[in-house]
Amino acid sequence: EVQLVESGGGLIEPGRSLRLSCAASGFPFDEYAMHWVRQVPGKGLQWVSGIYSNSDKVGYVDSVKGRFTISRDNAKNSLYLQMNSLRVEDTALYFCAKDLHHYVSDAFHMWGQGTMVTVSS
Amino acid sequence: QSALTQPASVSGSPGQSITISCTGTSSDIAVYKFVSWYQHHPGKAPKLIIYDVVHRPSGVSNRFSGSASGNTASLTISGLQADDEASYYCSSYTSFITAVFGTGTKVTVL
């Protein structure tokens, strides 16, 4: 059974940093691209970042470029999101999602339950 | 990276068919033809129901079907059921290794 378990969320002050993790199991992690998607409570989904299966290529939504860094450790079946210079508008539930392909596409096949990030002073 | 445009809400009676539109631009749907659809019940993880415009993942009901023309994609739900009441999001691959979601549509079963 495919499982994606996010962790690392919490309450953080603006300008600070936070690192999210996603532990994957139940599938060959190193064969699939992975993503972070967020949802502000009561609002819609927003794609945040994606990474190829071999980390060869990454992509970000414009609003987080230069502040967030996606990475993965295929040996540990883990996906990460380093979030720096956090802003109030980064407050959201962050989902980890598995792509259908080894390359970044828009087909987010499996999702975790999410970890909540609240940026507030 | 503007969100794709969806109607805020669509409703239908049990057994009816409804269609949700998803309008993009020349930078996404019209160019790449990579469109997916997701069903999202509150408090649950989103579920992929259509990918690559028309394909259904294993286990997804054939009551869900997708299509696209130009810069607009559509999701049709036939034989509407109570459990179909949820939010639905389209998505598309865009340029430079990015993806974008639609604004979301709340489906109500009357």
Image (tube, coloured by chain):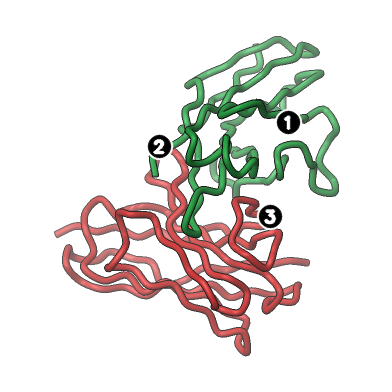
Judged by depth in the image, the label closer to the viewer, 2 or 3, is 3
- Whole-number angstrom distance, CA of label 2 to CA of label 3: 23 Å
**SS of the residue under disc 1:** strand
Task: Check residue A6 in the rendering and tell me which mark sits there, or answer none.
Answer: none
What's the chain of the residue with tag 1?
Answer: B
What's the chain of the residue with tag 2?
Answer: A
Q: Earlier in the sequence, mark 2 or mark 3?
A: 2
- Whole-number angstrom distance, CA of label 2 to CA of label 1: 26 Å
The spot of residue A41 in percent (x, y) is 39, 43
The kind of residue tagged 1 is Gly
Q: Quadrant of residue B90?
A: top right
- Whole-number angstrom distance, CA of label 1 to CA of label 3: 16 Å
Q: Quadrant of residue B63?
A: top right
Rendered-image quadrant of the N terminus of chain A: bottom right
Do callouts 2 and 3 point to residues on the same chain? Answer: yes
The kind of residue tagged 3 is His
**SS of the residue under disc 3:** strand
**Chain B tint in image:** green
- Above/below status of A95 relative to A7: above
Q: Which residue is mark 1?
A: B66
The kind of residue tagged 2 is Gly
- Above/below status of B84 relative to A115: above
Rendered-image quadrant of the C terminus of chain A: bottom left
The spot of residue A15 in percent (x, y) is 16, 67
Q: Which residue is mark 2?
A: A42
Q: Which residue is mark 3?
A: A109
Judged by depth in the image, the label closer to the viewer, 2 or 1, is 1
Q: Which residue sits at x=26%, y=73%?
A: A17
